[in-house]
Amino acid sequence: MTLHAQSTDIGGIILWAGLLLAAVILLIVVLWYVRRWFFAPPEESTGDIWSLQHLRELRRSGQISEDEYQRLKSQVIAQFQSPSNDADSDAQVPPG
């Protein structure tokens, strides 16, 4: 075996070792993302909560009346108001 043949063999080994290392790193990253996605907590669904847009569409299509729309709209808004906001707003109102 000549010196040139030995250097070519070493170069090929280094090339394939580098490719193997890159493939292993890529596999680890892919497995990490898949594991993260699989074990992620489920996103909270709004369930039966109605959006204002949905209520507007129901009113526009005639499925609910204007009075029903106003009542449901106030209920939807009340669901999204936090109790801490109500307490803060009461505390900021000067007595009088």
Image: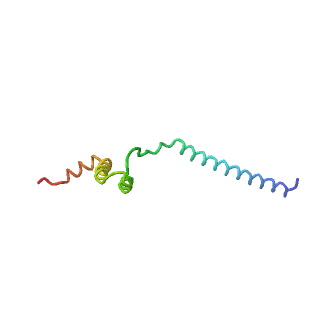
Image point (67%, 50%), residue name: 23
Q: Is residue 6 left or right of residue 60?
A: right
Outermost residue toward the left in this view: 96
Looking at this view, name the residue that lies furthest to the front: 62
* Picture coordinates of residue 67, whole percent (x, y): 28, 52
Task: Identify which residue, 10 or 80, lies in the foreground.
Answer: 80
Considering depth in this image, is 80 or 94 the residue closer to the camera?
Answer: 80
Which quadrant would the C terminus be assigned to in this image? bottom left
Q: Number of callouts in the render?
A: 0
**Measuring 20% from the left and 50% from the top, which residue is drawn there?**
90
Q: Residue at x 30, y 54 (%)?
A: 66
- Please state the horizontal and vertical placement of residue 14, each as a whole percent of the image: 74, 53
Q: Position of residue 24 (x, y in %)?
A: 66, 47
Q: Position of residue 72 (x, y in %)?
A: 31, 49
Q: How is the image coloured?
A: rainbow
Judge from the rendering whether residue 54 lies leftward or rightward of residue 32; answer left or right: left
Q: Residue at x 47, y 43 (%)?
A: 42
